[in-house]
Image (cartoon, grey):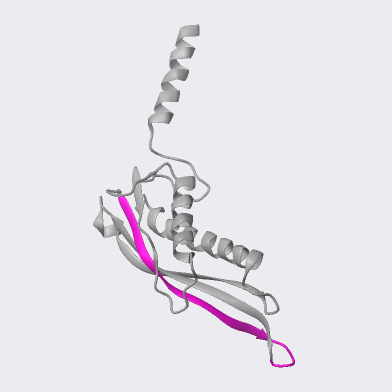
Amino acid sequence: MKNLKFILILFIGLTVMGCKVNYSFSGLTETPDTFQVNFFQNNADLVEPGLDRDFTIALQDLIVNQTSSQLVNTGGEVIYEGEIVEYRISPMTATADNTAAQNRLTIGVNVRYINTKDEEKDFEQRFSFFFDYPAADQLTGSTKDTAFEEIFERLTQDIVNASLSDW
C-alpha cells in the first residue's frame, strides 16, 4: 500500500511537471519554448539617450519573468522587433496664470510580432502609454526613473498580452 501511494504521487508529479501549461496571474497559460527580442531603435523626433536599450531590456525581462520561455539571440520561436516612434512631453493642465501645472510624458512603440509556428498570429501594432508629473519638476533623476518604470511596465505588459495571451 505504501509503494502504491509513492507510485501514485510520483506519477502525478511527473505528469504535472511534464505539461507545458503554466498557471500565471498574467493570463498566459501556454508559452513558446524560445523567444527573441531584437533591439528597438529609437526613431522618435525627440531622442532620449539610452531609452532604446532600456525598453528592449524591459521587454526581455518581462517575458523571462512571466513565462517559461528561454531568451535567445537568433532563431526564436516568436520574435519581437520594432522601434520607438514617439517620445513627447506636453503640458496637460494649466494654472490661473496660464502656465502648465502638469506635464505628460508619452512614449509610443511600434511592434512587429512574428510567430514562426503560426504566421496567422503575426501582427504589427502601435502601443503607447504616458506618465503625468508636476510641471515644476524636471524630467530628470527619480522623476524620469519613475516615469520610465511605469510606462515600460504598461507597454511591455500590453505587448505580451497582445502576443501571447492565446498561446
- From the viewer's side, name the closer residue of 121 and 54: 54
Identify whether 108 is placed above or below 160: below
Going by the picture, which residue comes out furthest to the front? 49
Q: Is residue 73 left or right of residue 6?
A: left
Instruction: Please tell me which residue lies in front, 127 or 99.
Output: 99
Residue appearing at x 59%, y 77% in the figure: 104
Foreground of the two, 39 or 1: 39
Residue 49, given in percent of the width and then of the height, sits at 49, 68
Residue 41 location in percent, x, y?
38, 66
The region drawn magenta spans: 78-98
| Residue 87 belongs to the span the image colors magenta | yes
Residue 66 position (above or below residue 129)? above
Assess whether residue 83 is covered by the magenta stretch.
yes
Q: Residue at x 44, y 64 (%)?
A: 52
| Residue under the point 72% across and 88% down | 95
Residue at the extreme right: 96
- Relative to residue 42, is residue 101 depicted above or below? below
Percent position (x, y) of residue 162?
41, 60
Would residue 101 be found to the left or right of residue 89 on screen?
right
Q: Is residue 48 visible?
A: yes
